[in-house]
Amino acid sequence: MNDDKRFYTFVFAPTAKSPLRKFNVHHRVIYSVLAFAGVGMLTVLYGAYLIAQHAVVVARLNLTQRENRQLREQNREAASRFDLLQTRLTALDTTQRKLAEGSGLSRSTDISRSVGRGGPGGAEGAGGESLLNLDNIEIATEALESELQHIKVAFDKNQLRLASTPTGWPVRGYISDGFGNRRNPFGGGGSEMHSGLDIATNHGTTITATADGVIIFAGMYSGYGNVVVIDHGYGLTTRYGHMSSIDVSVGQHVTRGRKIGAVGSTGRSTAPHCHYEVRLHDRPVDPLNYLSIGRS
Ligand SMILES: [Zn+2]
């Protein structure tokens, strides 16, 4: 197959006066040179591509390093805020512990243990530890919320109890007769049990409820004359006797300080006064013990 005689003829003149020179090059040589040139070009292109790629990688690396620095900075900031959060939670826990003790509640959980750094379970690196502690903070927050709910219920109960406990004077005046055994004020000798406190003052002076409650009686009742009976719950009732007028009716809810009537001398009475009675489970107790409640 060596009979391929295709040649390329090149003609050129080295100078203007010299004769033309001419030489032949076999077409295979030409193709080989072109092939080499092509491969060389591709190699150069590939090299350029590699260099460009390297530049991109370096740029990315720089970007990543910058991001890393920012992340480390943010991490430090988050860690310090996290510490602050833990401190605040611990402080909250202490406050709540005091509140619970004040409300007579026993604590069901110990929050400070789960708030503390490096809680149970250990940690896998710094990231793992902070994640773990975030879980703890979440648990501690939920426990605090539930404990606070208990305290609120106890507090509301106490509030209700306080509002329902007879406090202070039903009417301004002076005590003309105390609770307990006394001589019969209507004469005839002998003694009787006085079931309340007599507070003497002018006819028509306003009488107010000494605690929140519901009117369970309002009207005439033998020796009491015009009387109002309030049920305060917790086994407590109060009675206000000898009224000249009554301002409330049975079933009505009253709050402490609400006017319920006026001083009079109806029933078994010798002069205008309010017969004030406090009963615990329907047994009269000394109202004097209730007059000063809440007044210190
Ligand atoms: Zn009396």
Image (cartoon, rainbow, N blue to C red):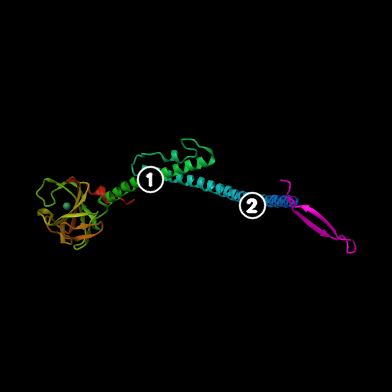
Residue type at mark 2 is: Val
Out of 259 and 134, give the one closest to the viewer: 134
Out of 41 and 255, give the one closest to the viewer: 41
Mark 2, Cα crowd under 10 Å, few <14 / some 14-19 / many 20+, is few
**Disc 2, SS:** helix
Residue type at mark 1 is: Leu
* Residue 23, picture quadrant: bottom right
Q: Are marks 1 and 2 in contact (CB under 8 Å)?
A: no
- Residue 290 in picture, x, y percent from top left: 26, 49
The relative height of residue 132 versus residue 227 in the rendered view (above or below) is above
Circle 1 is placed at which residue position?
99
**Disc 1, SS:** helix
Cα distance between the residues tagged 1 and 2:
62 Å
- Residue 197 in picture, x, y percent from top left: 20, 51
Q: Identify the image quadrant of the N terminus.
A: top right
Mark 1, Cα crowd under 10 Å, few <14 / some 14-19 / many 20+, is some
- Residue 105 in picture, x, y percent from top left: 34, 41
- Residue 81 in picture, x, y percent from top left: 52, 48
Q: Is 194 left, or right, of 33 in this rendering?
A: left
Magenta region includes residue 23: yes
Magenta region includes residue 9: yes
Mark sitting on residue 53: none
**Residues rendered magenta in the picture:** 1-28
In primary-sequence order, the first of circles 1 and 2 is 2
Q: Is 222 left, or right, of 138 in this rendering?
A: left
Looking at this view, name the residue that lies furthest to the front.
3
| Pointer 1 residue Cβ closer than 8 Å to ligand 1 | no
Circle 2 is placed at which residue position?
56
Out of 58 and 16, give the one closest to the viewer: 16
Q: Is 124 left, or right, of 152 in this rendering?
A: right
